[in-house]
């Protein structure tokens, strides 16, 4: 891979962006949705992108198109994560994007298997990948740790307990990590999207195309994956003394978790 870019490549005045050229970015959950859009955007911005996810066929197709590298990864499997880390010469940016929601049950009817899956992917998987790649981020001299969380990690709502609990866990973990790494050359960035229309998220959660479509019905211009990718790319190309602690991004039609304007025909 390319030789490291020294932190001194950033202007001491802080006016020049911290460019992607020569930097290596690892994106988890890169086979679809926000992860795929982020990999594509970072590649366009000059990063050498490592795309990691379970579905190697989809990864390979995208990696070939953007000039990246596809690596099969299951964030819930320790051996899989260890293999990812062992196969990387350097890491400048880690985008912890892998995650998901898998039910809409109220707490009284909790599906504990779904809760375990939600925590395994969103919380434990994120911690596992972060722990494995943090030494390389430190060694880069100017590392970026990006967490794609959710407004569900900031505000709770009915029918979302397994997911909101997991994302609250991610949010708290990110805040803690930022405190622990304050003296080190690693930025800790959290991007918290609201309503984002992707091909799989709501379908995986509701298990019904009709119910998934209803989530966005009447909402003028919900966010799409490329909007979130744009926020991630902006955050990691700021001068490295600038830390975007938390960026909450919603469509204009969503004023809050429970306040969504829906137009009628």
Image (cartoon, grey):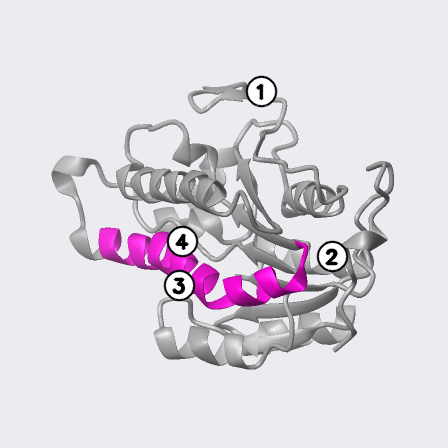
Local secondary structure at mark 4: helix
Is residue 209 in sight in this rendering? no
Residue 128 is labelled as: 3
First reached walking from the N terminus: tag 3 or tag 1:
3
Q: Nearer the viewer, mark 2 or mark 3?
A: 3
Local secondary structure at mark 3: helix
Q: Nearer the viewer, mark 2 or mark 4?
A: 2
Q: Quadrant of the N terminus?
A: bottom right
First reached walking from the N terminus: tag 1 or tag 4:
4
Is residue 138 in sight in this rendering? yes
Q: Which residue is mark 1?
A: 263
Q: Which residue is mark 4?
A: 204
Q: Give the answer, above or below, for where 57 lies relative to 219.
A: below
Q: Residues within 10 Å of mark 3 (few under 14, many from 20)?
A: some
Q: Nearer the viewer, mark 4 or mark 3?
A: 3
Give how far apart the Cα atoms at labels 3 and 1 are.
42 Å
Q: Which residues are magenta?
A: 114-142
Give how far apart the Cα atoms at labels 2 and 3 are.
23 Å
Residue toward you, 45 or 135? 135
Give how far apart the Cα atoms at labels 2 and 1 are.
34 Å
């Amino acid at each position: 891979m390319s030789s490291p870019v020294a932190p001194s490549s950033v202007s001491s005045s802080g006016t020049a962006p911290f460019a992607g050229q020569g930097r290596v970015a690892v994106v988890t959950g890169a086979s679809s949705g926000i992860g795929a859009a982020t990999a594509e955007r970072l590649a366009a911005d000059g990063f050498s992108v490592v795309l990691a996810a379970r579905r190697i066929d989809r990864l390979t197709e995208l990696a070939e198109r953007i000039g990246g590298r596809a690596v099969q990864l299951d964030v819930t499997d320790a051996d899989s994560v260890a293999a990812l880390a062992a196969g990387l010469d350097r890491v400048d940016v880690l985008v912890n994007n892998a995650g998901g929601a898998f039910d809409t049950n109220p707490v009284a009817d909790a599906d504990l298997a779904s809760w375990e899956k939600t925590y395994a992917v969103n919380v434990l998987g994120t911690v596992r990948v972060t722990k494995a790649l943090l030494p390389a981020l430190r060694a880069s001299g100017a590392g970026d740790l990006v967490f794609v969380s959710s407004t569900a990690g900031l505000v709770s709502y009915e029918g979302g307990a397994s997911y909101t609990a997991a994302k609250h866990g991610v949010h708290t973990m990110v805040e803690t990590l930022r405190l622990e790494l304050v003296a080190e050359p690693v930025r800790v960035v959290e991007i918290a999207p609201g309503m984002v229309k992707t091909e799989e998220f709501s379908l995986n959660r509701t298990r019904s195309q009709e119910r998934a479509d209803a989530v966005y019905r009447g909402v003028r211009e919900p966010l799409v994956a490329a909007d979130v990718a744009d926020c991630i790319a902006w955050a990691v190309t700021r001068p490295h003394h600038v830390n975007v602690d938390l960026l909450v991004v919603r469509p204009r039609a969503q004023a809050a978790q429970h306040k969504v304007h829906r137009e009628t025909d």
